[in-house]
Amino acid sequence: MQETSARQLPHHLALSALLLSLTILAPAYSQESETTSPLPPTLKLSGFATLGVTHHRNDDVGMVFSFDQKSLAHRGISGNLDSVLGVQLNWQMAESTSAVLQAVGRAGENMEPKLRMGYVRQQLGPDLAVRVGRYRSPLYFDSDITEIGYANMTVRPPLPVYWIANSVIAIDGGDVQWRHSLGNTALLLQGYAGSSSYKIRFNSANPVIESDNELSGLKGLAASVTLPHVTLRASRTWVNSTTLRSSQVDQLNAGLAQMAGGLSALAANPMLPAPLRTSLNNKAQAALGYTNPFDSSPIYTSVGFNANWDGWAVMGEWARFHSGSAMLGRADSYHLSVGRSVGDFTPYVGIARQQRKTPVLDTSALGPTGLHPQLDAGLAQLKGSLDEAASGTQKSSRSATVGVRWDFHDNMALKVQYDRFKTPNPYHPGPFANLRLPINNRINLVSVVLDVVF
């Protein structure tokens, strides 16, 4: 029989083989590490992995974990949504100084390794510490563990809420953490600042458009209180500017500038009535106002809780994304999940919703002038491009979830979950990666995942 190397295997099959090996070796590794460790005592190697498959029957859309996912979870069986492998190295450099490196590969990104964490932590006192480097984003309650499936009761944090936070997955900068205990209560205050960048893929375009999105001047505050049975957390994050650049945005900007110039030239004609000249000048200024329509200064707000008592687990969160942009608008979201442990099994249910609170981008300023067919055709083309882009930003959606988790072995869990996703209408893609509009705006998604930490 001819041998086949791991390099020749499709990436999802290679990942499956690797994760299966980890499930076999993880218990042996943990037992061996108690007696002999291949690493110096100042180094600690750990990791997490999820082998997950999904199934749905919607031909129009694919499921994605974040904006920059390359391979979609299309109709049928797919391992692209949840399968992930992460490896972390902790180095205790000195008594009060440590460093962390964490690399993650996702099946949806063709297992290309990405640096999620790479920072140095300095303890400044019993309660105060600083980190400098790359660290996971604290935007929402669970945004620092979204990829660690074992740490989540459900298969994944609910996508109608977390599709935004999953894209801003790491921050380059620093933070200050103050931790203090008062009896059986633990307090944590965190201030953070830095920048972030990621790709946004517009899958409805043919070919697919890939754009660079840069977040600069990011800063925020988070506070949490941990009591014996409940943790409460609130955070607010400000971004000075978000800039999205691609060749398509450049083409749109050029078209808007050319149109504004043409309108201004027409308005300079002294033979036209004064009211018409004023109207043309206003239309020219309005056209320039649509330049770089995705640029924004967003604010992220989150208030959430996680409660555990007598086998019950209840978690919920309210979040707001205020883009500061007419194109992206403002959206409020929430989720609530309830689970009950019975031996090694935890059945659970959940709901989630995101709702846009501001109207779609108004492009009426690009309406026809009635002066020249060629001019009005150019205006119609620009208006159509902006309207199509605005339709793609309609992310309102809701989901209902039911599932069960089975903790069948130390550091391992098997989960089976059913999600029903729906957007308000076929022209709202929600958290789906749509291939075209309109779409079949409902998905019944079945997920089976095996989570491991080692």
Image (spheres, rainbow, N blue to C red):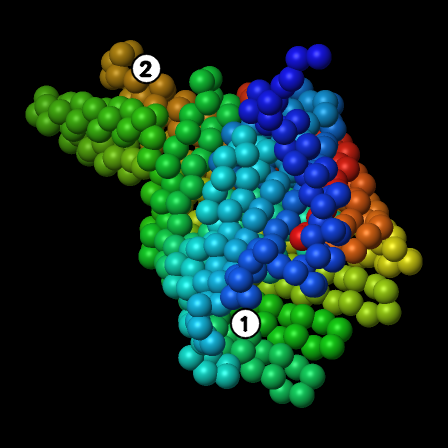
Q: How many angstroms separate mark 1 from mark 2 (CA)?
A: 54 Å
Image quadrant holding the N terminus, namely top right
Q: Nearer the viewer, residue 1 or 372?
A: 1
Q: Earlier in the sequence, mark 1 or mark 2?
A: 1
What x and y, as percent, mark residue 86?
58, 46
**Mark 1 vs 2: CB contact within 8 A:** no
Q: Is residue 291 left or right of residue 298?
A: left
Residue position for label 2 = 377
Which mark, by number, is residue 148?
none
Vertical order, 164 against 144 (above or below): above
Residue 114 in view of the camera = yes
- State which mark lies toward you, 1 or 2: 1
Which mark identifies residue 223?
A: 1
* Residue displayed at 44% across by 49% down: 323
As drawn, 36 above or below 165: below
Bin the neighbour count of mark 1 within 10 Å (Cα to Cα): few under 14, some 14-19, many 20 and up: some
Left or right: 272 as drawn, with respect to 243? left
Q: Residue at x 51, y 23 (%)?
A: 204
Residue at 32% across / 26% down in the picture? 247
Give the SS element for disc 1: strand
Residue positioned most to the bottom: 183
Neighbourhood count class around disc 2 (C-alpha, 10 Å): few under 14, some 14–19, many 20 upward: few
Which quadrant of the view contains residue 245? top left
Q: Say left or right for 76 vs 323.
A: right
* 438, above or below 29, in the image: above
The x and y percentages for residue 162 are 59, 48
Does residue 192 appear in the picture of this structure?
no
Q: Residue at x 43, y 37 (%)?
A: 199
Helix, strand or loop under label 2: helix
Tell me the amino acid under the disc marked 2: Ala
